[in-house]
Amino acid sequence: MSEPVLRLDAVERTYHMGGEEVHAVRGVSLTIESGEYVAIVGPSGCGKSTLLNLLGAIDRPDSGQVYLDGRDVGTLGDGEATALRLRRIGFVFQRFHLLAALNARENVELPMAEAGVGRAERSARARELLAYVGLAAREKHRPPQLSGGEQQRVAIARALANRPALVLADEPTGELDARTGGEIASLFRRLNDDGTTLVVVTHDEDLAAAAKRTIHMRDGVVVRDERASPLSVATGVPAARSQR
Amino acid sequence: MIARLVVASLTGHRARTLLAVAGVAVSAALLLDMVMLSSGMRESFRSLLTSRGFDLRVAPKGTLPFDTEATIADATAAIAVLRASPDIVAVAPVLGGTIHLPRAGGSAISSVALGVDPAAQGDYVLLDGREPGDGEIVANDALLAASGHHVGDSLTIAGGYDPQLRLLDAPRRVRISGRVRFVYLARDQRAAAMPLAAMQALGGPTRRDRVSLMMIRARSGADAEAVRQWIAARLPRVTAISTATAIAQVEQRLSYFRQLAFILGSVSLVVGVLLVGTLVTVSVNERIGEFAVLRAIGIARSTITAQIMLEGAVLMLAGALLGLGLGLVTARYLNAILASFPGLPQSIDFFLFQPRAAWTALGLLAIAGVAAGAWPAWRGASLPIARVLREEAA
């Protein structure tokens, strides 16, 4: 059996905020295989985003291990963790976080430039990715000239730039209206159908319904981990799921 | 891509960037002026003292050249002694004094006058006409303008003038053989030169066979210090000073200028660093979220550090280039003011532009620009990614 993309063993993460300890993640263990589409859901403050940061090697657990491609990210130095994020993980944020000074193509090129991809190659790939997310005609537009949905599409293209093993998205439809959120959900489904492993933190039921697996969190722990049947994913009906 | 981000960041806040560049330009102009001032007078004096090719100056014992009105007696014998040295190839004696030219109404014009050996002199540059022979003088523009004479004119001169009686002492007629520029005198200082014997005769018995100064040109390759010691051993009534020593003495006297220039230059540099440091810090604070996102998507600390430090360096260099031009203009203006100070040699510059000075100022500013961006760059690159993203999302 091949190595899972992600494996968490008894991961704990506690913050100190205003003199109080906040146990954001408590003893979470889970495995995410290549090609999965996982939605992490739960009420605000339940530890979803903290878990996502741990999965993405942005944060380190206080205890337990996070393995990405079999490597314990907790043991990596800053340089190694940065390189891992650059080459193996794609990030999509709620507020898009594109660089306003760069146009859409340049934003997509940015991670490739950092990875040392040549100018011609990264330009061609950026165009290809913008076409994939339906923005071929908008490559020279800067973020303020794009709608929210378009900006999020550019952010998704940027996340895919270095052909990551995993794409992590934190409330990717949180700033979008229902129609545009639906379009992003469709795009995620297409991404996953094309082989991208996706982990999405969301409150958006439609987006969660598109996932093949849903992890429910409450008070820093995983309270339910359910997988949808192929039929339910195709129809977007969340009821037809099997619990683990 | 880093360059693109730097340009985008700086052009994104045009007014702020322009104000910062203008501030750095003023700071850079002051720094350049201070660098020019610290070396300008020294280089100017060095150039002045070495331009005529003399290696030593011989003055009356215990004095500096033209420091007092003292003179060296038995000049003919002293010159003969000096010319006997195999290491001395030329001796240029100079007797300083004053001459008076009659003016309509009985008054007189006074002028500095030098008695020289026209064949070996190092006090003036001939601009027009020829060296003075018997019964001839050369004059500078200030004297020609004041007396209303031209090259070729004859005029009356005297070594003394009684203003009460309005009488010239032993006047004589001379002809102006040339127009000259005196190297060591002020631009507006009236001056003339004539053969040494004529000048000694004008001064009367007290000036007979006397000189104020002798300038010595040593043989090529000769050790000036050895020549000085040779002169000291044979002419105990004189003080010989090498040009190198004279330059060192001038440098010592100018040390206040250098200290002033150093302090003001340092202040301007610190102001530039604070200005750029403040601006880059503000810019980084505004973009903390942006840097956290960049770090999250895998942009290395070194890339972010380079971007921020480059922003500081670009601001500093843009200001420095503008400041160089501004500094040159202000130096020229200040030099004109200071050069008009009475009694200063015409060829002395307070602010001397030297490419090395410009490079020094530019180099200092570039280093300062990078240093100014160092702390904000470190902050921007080492922020806690997860916490900043969490705060940004809140």
Image (cartoon, coloured by chain):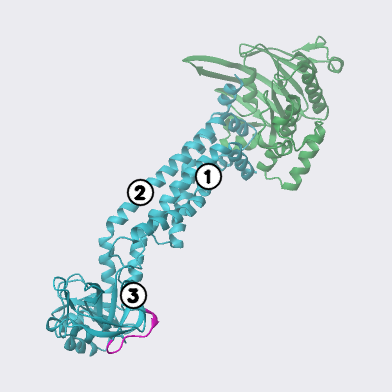
Chain colours: A green, B cyan
Badge 3 marks a residue whose secondary structure is loop
Identify the mark nearer the N-term, 2 or 3.
3
Chain for mark 3?
B
On the question of residue B382 being in view, the answer is: no
Q: Quadrant of residue A157?
A: top right
Which amino acid is tagged 1?
A: Leu
Residue B196 left/right relative to A180: left
Asked whether A27 or A110 is in front, the reply is A110
Which amino acid is tagged 2?
A: Leu
**In the image, is residue B229 above or below residue B274?**
below
Identify the mark nearer the N-term, 1 or 3.
3
- Residue with the mark numbered 2: B264
- Residue with the mark numbered 1: B315
Identify the mark nearer the N-term, 2 or 1.
2
The location of residue A164, given as percent across then percent down, is 72, 34
Residue B95 on the magenta span: no
Crowding at dot 3, Cα within 10 Å, few <14 / some 14-19 / many 20+, comes out as: few
Chain for mark 1?
B
CA–CA distance in space, label 1 to label 3: 57 Å
Residue A86 left/right relative to B221: right
Residue A180 left/right relative to A89: right
Magenta span: B126-135
Residue B131 on the magenta span: yes
CA–CA distance in space, label 2 to label 3: 46 Å
Badge 1 marks a residue whose secondary structure is helix
On residue B148, the disc is 3
**In the image, is residue B196 above or below residue A61?**
below
The location of residue B144, given as percent across then percent down, is 33, 75
